[in-house]
């Protein structure tokens, strides 16, 4: 379950575990022992979309595990069209690996899934990091689909990966960080994951839209330590939502990176890793 001989995300083998009738693909490595960190990925992401610098940085002190959601990448099944179903899958996945307590690091869609896990299985989670995300029914989160397709078109017209626009500001610093991030995602050259299909991405977008239309979740009852992180100019999930969550969770810290967008943690990966390790080790 824990491949300690592999200390780089670019070479960690992909493993599989059965849970909820699904064969989940995952990668696990790090220092082992203690409470593991479960990394929950963004919209349209597969295992190869995890930032190697963030994964390796956290793995220097903790076991960290990334997974493909049901119907995504190398995991079997059909992608669910609700955030709640994704959360139930992750809970089953964690239990199938034999863990009774984990820390969660959820980016974007993964942060939404993390909040539903907190609601459904609060005792399963010790601490949670919510990056580039927002609460259920959050401010302008119903625009994620529109913004995603606009930037997919921009990417097509400019021969760029859409994440260049979706995750980063179009300032000098933002563009430079985008190029470095996209280059890092190509460091793994063997045994890469299967790319997500357009159909599955649309299903995830449907789930995000439905979640954005639901009533707000009561975050005041969740006593877990929470670290909320974002850039100051998030176009996908407006930064206002990060301030909102930090106020509504009773035990939350907030970090906002200047001149950064949705992927602020990728642009500021060194600072983010340090803050994450400090937060987890408190």
Image (cartoon, rainbow, N blue to C red):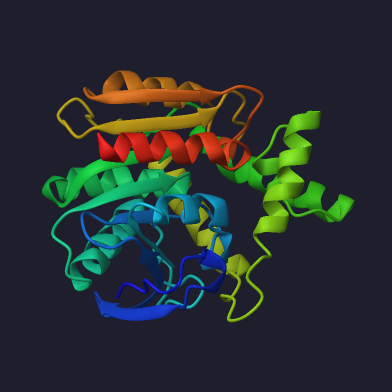
Total number of numbered labels?
0
Residue at left 56%, top 61%? Answer: 201
Q: Is 103 placed left or right of 46 in the picture?
A: left
Position of residue 99 measured from the top left corner of the image (x, y, whole percent): 17, 63
Q: Is 179 placed left or right of 194 in the picture?
A: right
Residue at left 41%, top 54%? Answer: 60
Q: Is 214 placed left or right of 217 in the picture?
A: right
Report the quarter where the C terminus lies: top left
Residue at left 61%, top 71%? Answer: 195
Along the line of sight, the residue nearer the viewer: 176 or 205 = 176
Residue at left 20%, top 73%? Answer: 96
Q: Is residue 215 visible?
A: no
Report the quarter where the N terminus lies: bottom left
Position of residue 243 measured from the top left corner of the image (x, y, whole percent): 42, 20
Q: Is residue 253 visible?
A: yes
Quadrant position of residue 259: top right
Position of residue 118 measured from the top left corner of the image (x, y, whole percent): 22, 44
- 88 relative to 220, above or below: below
Position of residue 248 measured from the top left corner of the image (x, y, whole percent): 28, 22
Along the line of sight, the residue nearer the viewer: 256 or 24 = 256
Q: Is 68 placed left or right of 250 in the picture?
A: right
The furthest residue to the right? 158
């Amino acid at each position: 379950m824990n491949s300690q001989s592999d200390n780089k995300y670019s070479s960690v083998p992909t493993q599989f575990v059965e849970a909820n009738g699904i064969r989940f693909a995952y990668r696990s490595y790090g220092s082992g022992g203690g409470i593991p960190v479960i990394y929950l990925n963004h919209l349209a992401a597969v295992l190869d979309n995890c930032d190697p610098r963030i994964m390796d940085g956290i793995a220097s002190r903790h076991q960290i595990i990334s997974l493909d959601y049901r119907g995504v990448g190398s995991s079997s099944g059909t992608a669910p069209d609700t955030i709640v179903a994704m959360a139930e899958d992750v809970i089953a996945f964690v239990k199938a690996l034999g863990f009774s307590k984990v820390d969660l690091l959820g980016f974007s869609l993964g942060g939404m899934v993390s909040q539903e896990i907190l609601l459904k299985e609060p005792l399963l989670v010790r601490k949670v990091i919510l990056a580039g995300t927002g609460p259920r029914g959050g401010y302008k989160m119903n625009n994620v689909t529109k913004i995603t397709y606009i930037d997919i078109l921009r990417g097509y017209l400019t021969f760029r990966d859409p994440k260049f626009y979706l995750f980063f500001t179009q300032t000098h610093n933002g563009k430079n960080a985008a190029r470095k991030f996209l280059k890092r995602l190509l460091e793994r050259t063997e045994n890469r994951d299967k790319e997500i299909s357009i159909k599955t991405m649309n299903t995830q977008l449907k789930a995000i839209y439905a979640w954005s239309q639901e009533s707000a979740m009561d975050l005041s009852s969740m006593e877990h330590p929470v670290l909320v992180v974002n850039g100051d100019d998030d176009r996908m999930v407006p930064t206002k939502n990060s301030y909102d969550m930090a106020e509504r969770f009773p035990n939350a810290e907030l970090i906002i990176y200047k001149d950064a967008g949705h992927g602020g943690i990728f642009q500021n990966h060194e600072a983010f890793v340090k803050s994450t390790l400090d937060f987890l080790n408190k």
